Image (cartoon, helix red, strand yellow):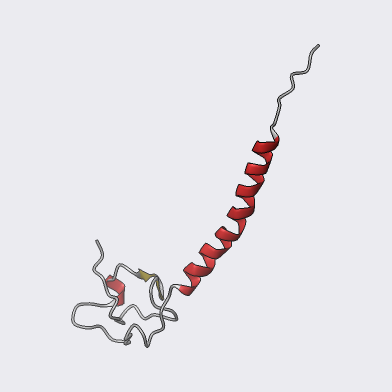
Amino acid sequence: MEIERTMVSRRWVIKTLSCLACAIPISGLASTLHAQAKVSKEQAAYQDKPKGDQSCSNCAHFVPPRACAVVAGDISPDGWSKYWAAKK
């Protein structure tokens, strides 16, 4: 019975390890940037009451029950910020 051997080149090993070495820090950086992407309530001109018919509960950025993809902190469904955008 004969065992089949496959050849792995030195170039392939170096290239693969280089890609892995670069990918690990980038994945950590992406999550850090995502966490820092939110703005403060002051920067967003956030208020706890709606502005006309615009409220956080009908905004595209609202994340139930009390969060926002753009504004940091506890967000009231009845609140409003200058980043309000209609749901599609």
The residue sitting at 26% across, 65% down in the picture is: 87
Q: Residue furthest front?
A: 11
The residue sitting at 63% across, 43% down in the picture is: 16
The residue sitting at 74% across, 22% down in the picture is: 5
Q: Residue furthest top?
A: 1
Q: For residue 63, what is the image quadrant? A: bottom left
Q: Quadrant of the N terminus?
A: top right
Residue 59 percent coordinates (x, y): 28, 71
Residue 83 percent coordinates (x, y): 29, 76
Between residue 31 and residue 20, name the one nearer to us.
Answer: 20
Instruction: Identify whether 14 is placed above or below 43.
Output: above
Q: Residue furthest right?
A: 1
Instruction: State the count of labels.
Output: 0
Instruction: Identify whether 7 is placed above or below 25.
Output: above
Task: Give the left or right position of residue 46, taking residue 40 as reference.
Answer: left
Q: Residue furthest left?
A: 52
Task: Give the left or right position of residue 46, taking residue 27 as reference.
Answer: left
Residue 56 percent coordinates (x, y): 31, 76
Q: For residue 77, what is the image quadrant? A: bottom left
Instruction: Identify whether 25 is placed above or below 50.
Output: above
Q: Quadrant of the C terminus?
A: bottom left
Instruction: Identify whether 2 is placed above or below 41.
Output: above
Residue 26 percent coordinates (x, y): 56, 59
